[in-house]
Amino acid sequence: MENNEIEKIIAQAIGEGSMCWSKTPKGIFDSVKAKELVEETIKKIKESKKANKFSEARKLMNETLLKDKGLYISYQANIAMLLNDEQERNKFCPIDYRNPTNRNEIAKKIINLIFS
């Protein structure tokens, strides 16, 4: 189903929903507000799809790492070496990982190592 078809279905549902009264209310239908509702609904659907794709990718990566011990060990070794290199680079001025800034910096490096 195309995105514009989904948008049309949502717009029609909002319009139909506005008429679900035992006695239909009188007044002017606010098409601007209805359009805003459609746009907000579509935005939420798209955000949900993006979140689901990333979640699925993480799940696939986890499953793959669990099945492929060699790949798992490779990732583990790369992360361990990154931590070792950081420690060696700062041999004379040890990194205090109790400091949130330091923890965030190493976390960024690990994320970049894994996802780039």
Image (tube, grey):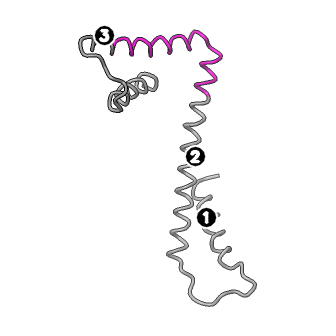
* Alpha-carbon span between mark 3 and mark 1: 59 Å
Residue drawn at x 75%, y 84% is: 22
Residue 49 circle label: 2
Residue drawn at x 44%, y 13% is: 80
- Return the x and y of residue 6 as percentages of the image width and height: 62, 58
Q: Was residue 68 drawn as part of the magenta stretch in this picture?
A: yes
**Residue 93, quarter of the rendered image:** top left
Q: In the figure, 98 relative to 47: above or below?
A: above
Q: Amino acid at mark 2?
A: Lys
**Residue 26, quarter of the rendered image:** bottom right
Crowd rating for badge 1 (residues with CA inside 10 Å; few <14, some 14–19, many 20+): few
* Alpha-carbon span between mark 2 and mark 3: 42 Å
Crowd rating for badge 2 (residues with CA inside 10 Å; few <14, some 14–19, many 20+): few
| First-in-chain label (2 vs 3) | 2
Q: Amino acid at mark 1?
A: Lys
| First-in-chain label (3 vs 1) | 1
| First-in-chain label (1 vs 2) | 1
Question: Which residue matches tag 3?
Answer: 88
Residue drawn at x 33%, y 23% is: 96
Question: Which residue matches tag 1?
Answer: 8
- Magenta stretch, main secondary structure, is helix
* Alpha-carbon span between mark 1 and mark 2: 18 Å
Q: Nearer the viewer, residue 49 or 69?
A: 69
Q: Which type of secondary structure does the marked residue at label 2 adopt?
A: helix
